[in-house]
Image (spheres, rainbow, N blue to C red):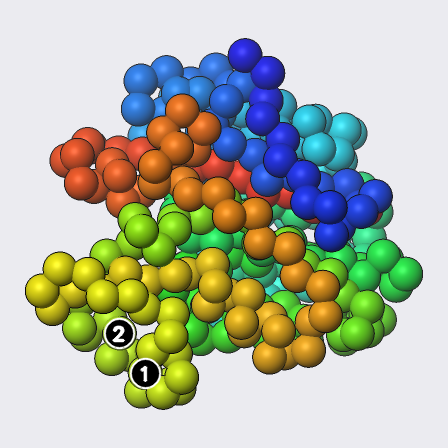
């Protein structure tokens, strides 16, 4: 099975891809392109899957990743760092060729950024906590610090859990509305005392408010498309012991 590389028109000729779960060598709950270093999958399979994923997007590049912690922190990368010393953060920014910036997700939103003229790219992991905390804003600021211009940055929001699949409780919606009352528009009524949250729309809105003029949202639901994507929430609802992670990559 070939690797499923999903590309965004907004990113043009910038080398990038939102990858799904197809095309790897893992088995069972991790079948097949699981790239999650923190999972209980066979380590050799993870290493090979990460190599295949990188080669599918940016052949011969060095994959650079993070120890993702649902923060709003962005790291500027000037040289590769070893997987054993990954920074605790949720966004990567670079202007150096040969680096494949990789973000892992399994329902959270992967967000890829580029200012092609400046030669600056970035990748961010936007779960609800990081999105609310401002991880996309931090990424834009970090890009500007190394030469990007906000009015030239284009962004693509990749596969993530869709509103119809993302049920939350009253405490959850309260967090968002306390931050900004207008955030109520990202929630639809669900069953009693529950709501359906549109993570993708929220991330897009944060980007637009930040001044990003071109944003492409792919509208792909990780929860419902089991053949194509891993999903933390789907695995949780089924009481499965673990789950895989997919990767999104961008580089120069």
Farthest residue toward the right?
A: 117
Which residue is drawn at the image coordinates 20% and 41% (left, top)? 236
Name the side, left or right, on which 57 lies relative to 3: right
Q: Quadrant of the N terminus?
A: top right
The residue to which callout 1 is attached is: 177
Q: Residue 54 appears in which quarter of the rendering?
A: top right
Which residue is drawn at the image coordinates 39% and 61% (left, top)? 198
Assign a secondary structure to mark 1.
helix
Whether residues under marks 2 and 1 lie with C-beta atoms below 8 angstroms apart, the answer is yes
Which residue is drawn at the image coordinates 48% and 15% (left, top)? 25
On the image, the x and y values in percent for residue 239 come to 14, 35
The CA distance from mark 2 to mark 1 is 6 Å
Farthest residue toward the top?
A: 1
Residue 104 visible: no
On the image, the x and y values in percent for residue 102 come to 60, 45
> How many marks do you count on the picture?
2
Mark 2 burial class by Cα count in 10 Å: few <14, some 14-19, many 20+: some
The residue to which callout 2 is attached is: 173
Residue 207 visible: yes
Given residues 1 and 47, the one toward you in this image is: 1
Name the side, left or right, on which 220 lies relative to 156: left
Mark 1 burial class by Cα count in 10 Å: few <14, some 14-19, many 20+: some
Farthest residue toward the left?
A: 192
Q: Which mark is residue 57?
A: none
On the image, the x and y values in percent for residue 79 come to 74, 51
Name the side, left or right, on which 231 lies relative to 62: left
Which residue is drawn at the image coordinates 83% and 43% (left, top)? 13
Given residues 29 and 184, the one toward you in this image is: 184
On the image, the x and y values in percent for residue 125 come to 51, 56
Farthest residue toward the front?
A: 189
Assign a secondary structure to mark 2.
helix
């Amino acid at each position: 099975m070939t690797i499923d590389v999903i590309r965004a028109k907004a990113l043009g000729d910038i080398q990038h891809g939102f990858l799904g779960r197809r095309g790897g060598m893992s088995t069972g709950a991790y079948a097949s392109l699981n790239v999650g270093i923190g999972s209980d999958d066979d380590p050799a399979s993870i290493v090979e899957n990460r190599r295949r994923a990188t080669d599918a997007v940016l052949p011969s590049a060095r994959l650079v990743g993070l120890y993702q912690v649902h923060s709003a922190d962005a790291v500027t990368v000037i040289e590769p760092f070893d997987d054993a010393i990954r920074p605790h953060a949720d966004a990567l920014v670079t202007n150096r060729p040969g680096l494949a910036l990789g973000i892992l997700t399994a329902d959270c939103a992967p967000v890829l950024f580029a200012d092609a003229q400046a030669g600056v790219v970035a990748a961010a992991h936007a779960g609800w906590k990081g999105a609310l905390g401002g991880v996309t804003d931090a990424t834009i600021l970090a890009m500007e610090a190394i030469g990007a211009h906000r009015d030239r940055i284009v962004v693509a929001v990749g596969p993530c859990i869709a509103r119809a699949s993302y049920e939350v409780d009253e405490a959850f919606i309260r967090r968002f509305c306390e931050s900004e009352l207008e955030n109520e528009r990202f929630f639809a009524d669900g069953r009693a005392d529950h709501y359906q949250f549109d993570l993708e729309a929220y991330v897009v809105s944060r980007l637009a408010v930040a001044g990003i003029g071109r944003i492409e949202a792919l509208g792909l639901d990780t929860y419902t498309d089991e053949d194509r994507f891993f999903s933390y929430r789907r695995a949780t609802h089924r009481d499965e012991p673990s789950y895989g992670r997919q990767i999104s990559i961008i580089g120069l």
